[in-house]
Amino acid sequence: MKSSGTRSTPSGKSSTTSTGGRAVGVKSAKPVAVQAPLTAVKVVRVDLPEGYRPARGEEYMNPFHLEYFRQKLLNWRAELVEESKQTIDNLREEVRDVGDEAERATRETENSLELRTRDRYRKLINKIEKAIKRIDEGEYGYCEETGEEIGLERLEARPIATLCLDAQERYEHRQKMMGD
């Protein structure tokens, strides 16, 4: 059974989409249906127009929004992976025979900082992967706690956000009260 719906394009015009993954009336769209393994949600993939940025007047989390944030997340992940590779290369190239104890201590401190940064990158990459999975499952852009829209501005600033601003503030307040 196929159903169809209406989606907004970046120009604000409506286009008809079907669950078969075909977008009709969207000139720049080259849709690809993606079946999420745990849900029946199909995400329509599109080619973004040059310089596209989500706008308020568009339907929230339409295929263009989802693809925009997917690309933003993929690019961010690629940058973090590249920086991690550079960290590893720097640590490998470093000469282990250091003259005096003071210089050795300085190098160990620098290495420790680099490794902590790399660990933060690893955790951030994991959050990016989860955000991409939420896009694939059709859950991206909505608060995990309340189901409300997270908002384009918040997602633009923090594309891995899983909570709306109010829910995030409540979470941070609880953390502060617990002393974590």
Image (cartoon, helix red, strand yellow):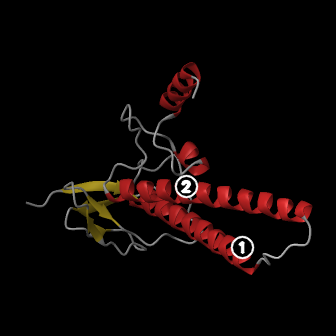
Point out the image quarter for the N terminus.
bottom left
Q: What residue is shown with label 1?
A: 91
Residue, x 61% and y 66% (percent of image)?
Answer: 80
Nearer to me, 86 or 127: 86
Which picture quadrant has residue 22?
Answer: bottom left
What numbered label is drawn on residue 124? 2
Where's the C terminus, which quadrant?
Answer: top right
Q: Position of residue 122 (x, y in %)?
A: 55, 59
Taking depth in this image into account, of 149 and 54 the one nearest to the observer is: 149
Residue drawn at point x = 89 percent, y = 62 percent? 101
Q: Position of residue 113 (x, y in %)?
A: 73, 56
Q: Describe the element under mark 1 as helix, strand or loop.
A: helix
Q: CA distance from mark 1 to mark 2?
A: 21 Å
Q: Amino acid at mark 1?
A: Leu
In the image: residue 7, left or right of residue 163: left
Would residue 17 be visible to someone looking at this image?
yes
Residue 10 visible in the snapshot: no
Q: Residues within 10 Å of mark 1 (few under 14, many from 20)?
A: some
Q: 41 or 100, which is in the foreground? A: 100
Res 98 → quadrant: bottom right
- Which numbered dot is residue 158? none
Q: Amino acid at mark 2?
A: Leu
Q: Is residue 179 above or below residue 10?
A: above
Is 60 left, or right, of 124 in this rendering?
left
**Which SS class for mark 2?**
helix
- Relative height, residue 99 to residue 123 (above, below): below
Q: Residue at x 44, y 59 (%)?
A: 129
